[in-house]
């Protein structure tokens, strides 16, 4: 499992993360929820050692960070991270030449699933197709954990549906998945655990199915309870959903 | 090791997209300078025959002394200076943030540092050899275009005297000088890479620290070079010893830059 133990992050005097503790177990889909700027992306960057923590520790299957971790954890950011002049085929070859866990067969299958043309250059792709390429490159690795940053952000409805299908497919089966998102509706019925954040702190962590059965509440209902002092932010969520 | 070689090949491919056009452009300008000199020679020859004025001697200095020639020679070194910054900042800036992918490769992050640095070494060697090849070709063409009685042959190391600084710096005449000058430049490159990584790790504070580190590298080197000129020094150091001290300093700075960069890439750098 991925463990975050008392993780703090400061930018100058500003506290971005203030004592974050949670785990991402294998075989479950967890989601980090919170408005923009609460530190969701920072957490993912910390897990991937793309940003140093100010204090605290992150363990992956009990190990501290080392280069081999990237064959264990895959990160799918919400920005284009492939060279614009590369063709999709070249980006796949690049991954194949560095990652032991690159699964070429699965990558080819995903090309078909996402209806991507491997001779297309990255710079000619729409935002939705860039997101699909990111997913392809991240999910074609036979890793134990997958981190996804805002996979639905700025994506059209048809692409959203395709991305949602990924979460119910064999592509994430038995993996520990951590998603950050605003789009609660898209993931309501696929996530196992939800972690609600605000101002760099975790406000609540719960098992979605358990809450549905015991309290009859959805993720949005719990968000209303938790964020009630911040009703203006709740309306932002409603706005985002439109 | 195989992954490092793949990364090096990848970085080299990216650099050659800039270096080859620069070398071609430089070569084209050098040939323009050559043909301009040959045209002048023909004009002089015609004038000399018509007016019976004695003909002047021509040598490679007439080609390299043409205003265009130093511009051509400096294109490639200027590209190296530009690319030494661009090779890092291109990974962070722009529409696609490739630094994510580079930092998430399952390899020691120093491979990124060394692949970029060795790309410069290979590129530098390629540019150096190409220029010597070009000199040889220009030499042969020029020699054949000028009548032997008006042609003064020059050693290839002396073809640039009008620009002695360029000649001494870019085209050293002995292997020791070559190692010394290019070693100095390579250590300066590593110091610059370290300065860039300081900036990428600590933003403004890092930029200030990086600039100080980069300048300190030159100050240290020139301090050693000037040891004998300091009047208060109680001893005189042999030039060969100064040369050795400079060499040791260059090596030491390469190691220090690599160590600092290792720590920054491992623990401090951010996307």
Image (spheres, rainbow, N blue to C red):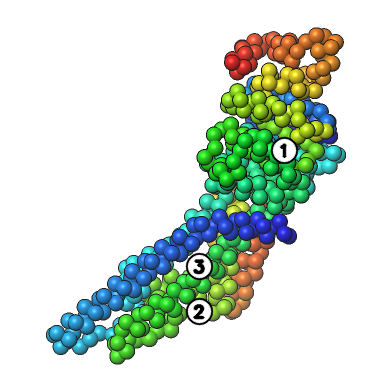
Residue at image coords 76%, 49%: A100
User: Residue A128: where, in percent of width, then height?
Assistant: 58, 31
Quadrant housing residue A53: top right
Q: Residue B97 carries which label?
A: none
The total of numbered circles placed on residues is: 3
Tell me how far mark 1 sits from mark 2, CA to CA. 55 Å
Tag 2's secondary structure?
A: loop
* Any part of residue B257 in sight: no
A128 relative to B255, above or below: above
* Residue that sits furthest to the bottom in the current view: B149
A27 relative to A138, above or below: above
Chain hosting mark 3:
B
| Residue picked out by circle 3 | B127
* Residue that sits furthest to the left in the current view: B51
| Residue picked out by circle 1 | A139
| Residue picked out by circle 2 | B173
């Amino acid at each position: 499992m991925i463990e975050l133990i008392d993780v703090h992050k400061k930018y100058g005097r500003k506290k971005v993360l203030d004592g974050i503790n949670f785990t991402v177990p294998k075989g479950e889909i967890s989601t980090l929820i919170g408005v923009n700027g609460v530190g969701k992306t920072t957490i993912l960057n910390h897990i991937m050692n793309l940003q140093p923590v100010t204090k605290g520790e992150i363990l992956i299957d009990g190990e501290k960070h080392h280069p081999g971790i990237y064959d264990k954890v895959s990160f799918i950011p919400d920005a284009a991270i492939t060279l614009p002049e590369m063709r999709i085929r070249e980006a796949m070859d690049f991954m194949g030449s560095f990652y032991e866990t690159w699964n070429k067969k699965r990558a080819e299958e995903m090309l078909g699933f996402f209806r991507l043309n491997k001779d297309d250059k990255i710079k000619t792709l729409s935002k939705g197709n860039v997101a699909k390429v990111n997913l392809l490159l991240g999910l074609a690795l036979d890793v134990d954990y997958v981190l996804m940053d805002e996979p639905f952000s700025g994506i059209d409805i048809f692409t959203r549906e395709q991305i949602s299908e990924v979460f119910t497919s064999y592509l994430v089966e038995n993996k520990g998945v951590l998603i950050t998102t605003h789009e609660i509706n898209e993931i309501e019925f696929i996530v196992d655990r939800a972690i609600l954040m605000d101002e760099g702190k975790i406000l609540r962590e719960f098992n979605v199915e358990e809450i549905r059965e015991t309290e009859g509440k959805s993720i949005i209902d719990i968000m209303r309870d938790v964020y009630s002092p911040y009703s203006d932010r709740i309306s932002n969520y409603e706005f985002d959903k439109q | 090791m195989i992954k490092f070689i793949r990364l090096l090949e990848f970085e080299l491919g990216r650099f050659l997209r800039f270096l080859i056009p620069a070398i071609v452009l430089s070569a084209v300008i050098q040939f323009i300078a050559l043909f301009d000199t040959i045209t002048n020679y023909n004009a002089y020859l015609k004038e000399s025959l018509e007016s019976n004025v004695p003909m002047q001697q021509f040598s490679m200095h007439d080609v390299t002394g043409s205003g265009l020639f130093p511009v051509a020679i400096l294109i490639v070194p200027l590209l190296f200076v530009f690319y030494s910054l661009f090779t890092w900042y291109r990974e962070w800036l722009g529409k696609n943030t490739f630094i994510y992918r580079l930092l998430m490769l399952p390899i020691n992050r120093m491979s990124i540092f060394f692949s970029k640095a060795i790309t410069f070494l290979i590129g530098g060697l390629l540019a150096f050899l190409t220029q010597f090849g070009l000199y040889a070709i220009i030499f042969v063409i020029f020699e054949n275009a000028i009548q032997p009685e008006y042609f003064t042959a020059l050693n290839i190391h002396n073809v640039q005297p009008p620009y002695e600084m360029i000649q001494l710096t870019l085209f050293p005449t002995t292997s020791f000088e070559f190692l010394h000058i290019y070693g100095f430049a390579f250590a300066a490159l590593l110091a610059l890479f370290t300065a860039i990584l300081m900036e990428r790790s600590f933003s403004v504070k890092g930029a200030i620290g990086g600039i100080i580190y980069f300048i300190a590298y030159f100050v240290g080197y020139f301090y050693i070079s000037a040891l004998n000129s300091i009047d208060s020094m109680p001893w005189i150091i042999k030039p060969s010893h100064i040369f050795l001290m400079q060499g040791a300093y260059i090596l030491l700075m390469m190691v220090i830059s690599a160590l600092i960069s290792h720590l920054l890439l491992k623990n401090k750098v951010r996307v």
